[in-house]
Image (spheres, helix red, strand yellow):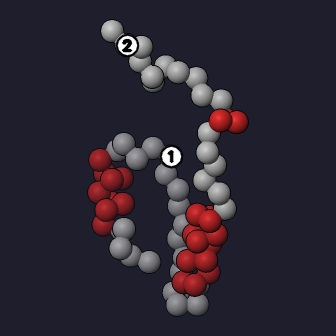
Amino acid sequence: MPKSKRAKIVHTSKTQRKGKELPLRLYAGIQECIPQYPYLYIFTVRNMRNQHLKDVRTQLSDSR
C-alpha cells in the first residue's frame, strides 16, 4: 500500500503564493459599486459546509 499524501507536512516556504492580484480585483469591484448603491454589505464566512450558507451563496453569486 502506498503512503497517503494527506498526512504529509508541507512548509509554507515551499507553497506558492496567491499574489496581490486577487485582493486588488476585489477592492476595485467594491469601489466601483460604491456610487451605484446606497448600501454596501461585505461579509466573510469561514466554513461553507453548511447547506443553508451554500444555498445563499449560489443565490447571491450573480448579484452585486
Q: Position of residue 42 (x, y in %)?
A: 54, 66
What amino acid is found at the position of numbered circle 1 in the picture? Arg
- Which residue is the site of mark 1? 46
For the N terminus, the quadrant is top left
Counting residues from the N terminus, which is met first, the one under dot 1 or under dot 2? 2
Establish if 34 lies above or below 54.
Answer: below
Residue found 62% across the figure and 65% down from its top: 21
* Position in image of residue 59 (x %, y %): 30, 66
**Is label 1 in contact with label 2 (beta carbons under 8 Å)?**
no
Image quarter hosting the C terminus: bottom left
In this picture, residue 13 sits left or right of residue 61: right
Residue 19 lies, with reference to residue 7, above or below; the image says below
Nearest the viewer among 34 and 2 is 2
Q: CA distance from mark 1 to mark 2?
A: 33 Å
Foreground of the two, 24 or 17: 17
Q: Check disc 2 and give the amino acid type.
A: Pro
Look at discs 1 and 2 and give the one toward the viewer. Answer: 2
Residue denoted by label 2: 2
Instruction: Identify which residue is drawn at 36% across, 68% down.
Output: 60
